[in-house]
């Protein structure tokens, strides 16, 4: 391949890649980013949130999805949120969810700045979204972005014994539930810059 610059990948190319790739990728405006593996701590936090929301969503009726379901955040942005609640109709064969009510991202050293920057901007453009929760992996803290009754975005932070309202489902998550069996570090851990570009070359000939 030499020093040739690879072509930008189309959405169609991205979908084809995801059908056969052993790892998941997120897609942002023609660029493809491989998703790295998660720590036990990260998985426990995600699992705690999903376990609490899934039975409530099923009775709503809505759907709660964990991180294997892809979300269309825009026509050129596809992410895999850690947890999302969708109350719009979905087919059992769908591989892309649309119209979420709640999106949750649990930070990691490689994604924290993306979660609080690029994804925050993208998710807030979704007309159906009523809350975006950024759950810290290093301390007991949830950053909540939510729409008020006028449709304007608000922001607050919940710490200690805080309770997190979940729109559409009419329930709350406590920080005790979110961080159950999670051992947080005594010393703050560093966060890296963000995405690492995948090495997949869209210009490769078969």
Image: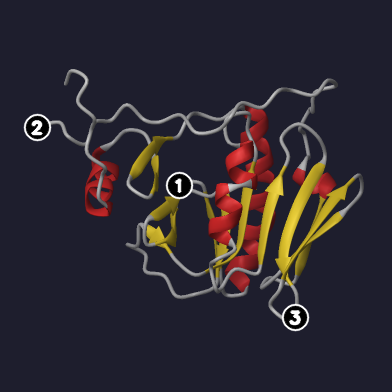
| Residue 10, position as x, y percentages in the image | 25, 50
Residue located at (58% from left, 41% from top): 114
Q: CA distance from mark 1 to mark 2?
A: 29 Å
The furthest residue to the bottom:
150
Label whose residue precedes the other's in the sequence (1 or 3): 1
Q: In the depicted view, which residue is nearer to us: 118 or 86?
A: 118
Mark 2: secondary structure = loop
Q: Quadrant of the N terminus?
A: top left
Foreground tag (1 vs 3)? 3
Q: Characterize the local packing of mark 2: few (<14), some (14-19) or many (20 or more) Cα atoms within 10 angstroms.
A: few
182, above or below 10, in the image: above
Q: Which mark is residue 149?
A: 3
Does the CB distance between marks 2 and 3 fall below 8 Å?
Answer: no
The furthest residue to the left:
206
Residue located at (17% from left, 34% from top): 203
Q: Which residue is mark 1?
A: 68
Q: Which residue is mark 2?
A: 205
Label whose residue precedes the other's in the sequence (1 or 2): 1
Q: Quadrant of the C terminus?
A: top left
Label whose residue precedes the other's in the sequence (2 or 3): 3
Foreground tag (1 vs 2)? 2
């Amino acid at each position: 391949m030499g020093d040739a610059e690879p072509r930008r990948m189309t959405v169609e190319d991205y979908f084809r890649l995801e059908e056969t790739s052993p790892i998941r990728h997120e897609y942002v405006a023609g660029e493809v980013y491989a998703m790295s593996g998660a720590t036990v701590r990260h998985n426990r936090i995600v699992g705690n949130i999903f376990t609490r929301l899934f039975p409530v969503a099923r009775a709503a009726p809505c759907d709660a999805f964990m991180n294997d379901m892809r979300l269309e955040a825009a026509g050129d942005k596809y992410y895999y949120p850690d947890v999302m609640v969708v109350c719009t109709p979905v087919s059992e064969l769908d591989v892309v969810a649309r119209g979420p009510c709640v999106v949750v991202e649990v930070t990691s050293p490689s994604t924290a700045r993306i979660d609080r920057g690029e994804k925050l901007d993208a998710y807030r453009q979704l007309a159906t979204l009523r809350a975006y929760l950024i759950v810290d992996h290093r301390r007991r803290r949830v950053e909540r972005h939510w729409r008020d009754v006028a449709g304007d975005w608000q922001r607050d932070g919940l710490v200690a014994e805080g309770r997190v309202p979940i729109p559409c489902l009419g329930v709350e998550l406590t920080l005790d539930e979110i961080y159950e069996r999670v051992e947080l570090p005594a010393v703050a851990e560093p966060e890296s810059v963000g995405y690492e570009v995948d090495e997949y070359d869209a210009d490769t000939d078969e």
